[in-house]
Image: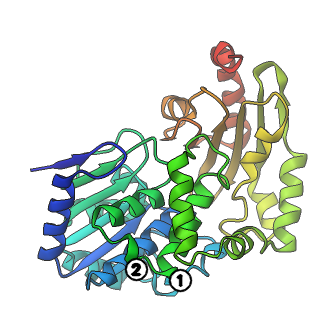
Amino acid sequence: MLYYCIFGRMNLTDVAKLKELLLQSENIVIVPHKNPDGDAIGSSLGLQHFLKILNKKAIIIVPNEYPKFLKWIPGSKDILNFEKKNGTALELLEKADLIFTLDFNDLSRTGRMEGVLKNASARFVMIDHHQQPDTYATVTYSDVHMSSTCEMVYNTIEAFGETEAITKDIATCLYTGIMTDTGSFKFSSTTSRTHRVVANLIDSGAENMLIHQQVFDTNSPARLRLLGVALNNMVILEEYRTAYITLSQEELDQHHYLKGDTEGFVNYGLTLEGIVFAVIFIENKEEGIIKISFRSAGAFSVNDFARSHFDGGGHINAAGGRSTTDLEETTKRFVSLLAHYKSQLQE
C-alpha cells in the first residue's frame, strides 16, 4: 500500500507508517538529487542527525560532487560520493532496506544512480517540494508550497514529537537549506510558518550569522571574476521583461571553475527593474549539454516553461533544464520562444 501526505504537515497515518518502516529497517540510505544544493545537503544531513537520535544509522550517498561552500556543514565529511566511491556505494544500496530520497520528485534526478535505485529491493520514503512527484515511494511526503525540503524535515521531526531533541547540528543543517532555498528568505515560498521554524532552529543553536558567512562570504577571486564575466555577458530583452546570461566552457576554464561557482548568478537578472524572467545558460562540454537555470518573479511559471521546452522542471519561480544543441543555437531557440509568452510576461 502507498501512503501519501500532500499537504503541509504529515498526518497520523503517514507518521505511523514511517515509524513502522524505521523499526523494520537496519540498513538506511539517504539520497539527494544530482548536483546537490544547500537544501539537498542540509535536509539529508539534518535527517541523518535526527535518525541517530532515534538510534538509527543512515548513510548519505550523493550522486556526484557538490559545492565547497557546503562542505563545512556538520556531518558532511562522512557523505559518500557515488562517482568516487562507486563500489562501496553500490554495496550499501544493495543491502539497504530503506532509502530516503530528499529534494527530488523522480529517480531520473539522481543521474547515474537512477538504474541502481530503480532495481533496489529497499522501500522508499520521498520527502520533497517539487511539482508532479513520481509514485515509487512507500511513503510520499510532498508539498509544492513548502519553502524547502529542510522545512519538511523539520515538520517530520515535529510529527514525531521530537522538536525538543533538535541539536545544534540538526538546527544548523536545516537552517542552511531553508536559507539557501528561499534566497535568504525573500522568495514567495517563505511563509510565516517558515520564519517560525527558523526561529525555533536559532533557539536550538543555529548561528544564523555564521551560516550566512560560511555560505556566501567564502568567494575565491576566480569566482568573483567569473561573476564579472557573467554580468558582462548578460542580455536584457526589455520587450519580454527578460534577462539571460551565457557562460561558455572556455570562460569557465579560464576562471578555474569549480562546482558551485555559478550558484546564484541567475538571480542577478531579477534584480533589474522591470525584469520578471531570468535565465543562465552554462556550457558543459564534458556532458555535451547546456545546463539551464530559470528564475521568475510573480505568476510566470518557469516550471511549465522548462518542462515544455527544455526537458526540465522544478517550481513555479525556480526551475532547471538542459539543451543538447550548442550554446548559440540554444539561446536563439530560447529567444524565439519568448514571443509566445509575451502576454504572460507582461502581466
Between 36 and 164, the one nearer to me in the picture: 164
**Residue shown at 13%/68% (left/top)?**
20
In the image, what residue type sits under mark 2?
A: His
Q: Is residue 33 left or right of residue 2?
A: right
State the count of labels. Answer: 2
Q: Who's the residue at 68% across and 16% down the image?
A: 347
Q: Are marks 1 and 2 in contact (CB under 8 Å)?
A: yes
**Residue 4 drawn above or below residue 220:** above
Question: Does the rendering let one see residue 65?
Answer: no
Task: Check the image and report above or below for 164 versus 283.
Answer: below
Q: Quickly name the residue at label 1.
A: 74
Q: Is residue 189 visible?
A: yes
Q: Which residue lies under the disc numbered 2?
A: 49
Figure quadrant of residue 251: bottom right
Whole-number angstrom distance, CA of label 1 to CA of label 2 = 9 Å
Q: What SS does tag 2 mark?
A: helix
Determine the image quadrant of residue 255.
Answer: bottom right
**159 or 249, nearer to the observer:** 159
Q: Position of residue 33 (x, y in %)?
A: 44, 60
Front-most of residues 280 and 43? 43
Q: Is residue 48 above or below residue 141?
A: below
- Number of other residues with Cα within 10 Å of mark 2, as a class: few under 14, some 14 to 19, many 20 or more: many
Label 1, secondary structure: give it: loop
Per the rendering, the mark at residue 137 is none
> Position of 236 compared to 167: left or right?
right
Closer to the chain start, of discs 1 and 2, is 2
Q: Residue at x 52, y 35 (%)?
A: 303
What is the residue that sits farthest to the left in this orientation?
1
In the rendering, at what x and y percent does residue 130 appear?
43, 45
Residue type, numbered disc 1: Pro
Colouring: rainbow
Which x, y percent locates residue 343? 66, 12
